[in-house]
Amino acid sequence: MITFLEFILTGAIAGTVYGLTALPMSLVHSTTHAVDSAVGGYVVVAGFIAATIGGIVGSIAAIIAATGLSLLSYGLYILLRRRGPVNPITYVLLTFGLLTVLESFILWWRGPDGIVRSLFSGEIQVAGMSVSPQALVNLLVGAAVVGSLLFVIYRTPAGLWLRASASNVKGANLAGLAVDRLWASVFIVQGAVAGLAGVLLLNTAGMSYQSAAHLTLMAIAAAMIFGFRGPTTAFCGGLVLGVVESVAIGYVSGAIATALPFIIILAALMIGSRNVAVRA
């Protein structure tokens, strides 16, 4: 029983990072109805910058760099919009290309070797279980990000404007809202949260250039567990995915754990297609 609970706690550590990667992706989707598939690249670039510079300055630089990359993605989205209505698939493919560029850049910059950093040298005992203090840090940071985001969305005028622009773009423009600026702020939040996830991942399990695509797939799978219904459910989906992955590694095999995001995405697409057919 103790071993099973340890797997759950271990999964929650990784799941927090998955959730913090899926959360901003889902926020962008809820606002613009587009999926930024380069978000895993922002996470990994941030992690490597934090490791290279080190300290608080490195963490701040990592978040700023991830925010800049997210704004670059928004710039690509704006270019597509100027040509007419944006096909979601076109934007997914475009940002997947950006993800590939970021992976290649990291490979050229740092090489194929992974990197990991640990802020804590020991573990703490909780009810007979060995728990890394990093688990507590990850969960507290995740809860703080989700709570702050919910407060902004549902308790501030900016959140009301954002929800209005997501529901009706033309109506929001006619009401005098600066929709482009509102959406730019969403991409800024996406980059900042992704950068924070990169710093946490560096201190949790480490990363390599190959982590970028894996994190994007994990984020998509986490967001799709509850049907891309919003940033909160995306974060919860990341926790679920992390726990299931950890239990699968511990009791089944690593191969099944590796295939989990593909299985979840396939199942979500099949269920979604079936629901569409039933409604039709």
Image (tube, helix red, strand yellow):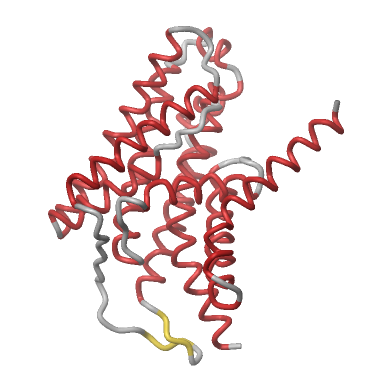
Is 123 located above or below residue 15 in the figure? below
Q: How many marks?
A: 0
| Residue 270 placement, left or right of 103 | right
Quick one: quadrant of the C terminus? top right
| Residue 231 placement, left or right of 69 | right
Q: Along the line of sight, which residue is nearer the eye, 146 or 176?
A: 146
Residue 117 placement (x, y as % from top left): 24, 67
Residue 264 placement (x, y as % from top left): 63, 51
- Residue shown at 54% from the left, 25% from the top: 89
- Residue shown at 55% from the left, 15% from the top: 169
- Residue shown at 60% from the left, 17% from the top: 168
Image quarter for residue 259?
bottom right
| Residue 129 placement, left or right of 41 | right
Quick one: quadrant of the N terminus? bottom right
- Residue shown at 35% from the left, 43% from the top: 41
Residue 231 placement (x, y as % from top left): 53, 44
Image quarter for residue 133?
bottom left
- Going by the picture, which residue comes out furthest to the bottom? 128
| Residue 211 placement, left or right of 106 | right
Residue 57 placement (x, y as % from top left): 14, 52
Is 135 located above or below residue 261 in the figure? below
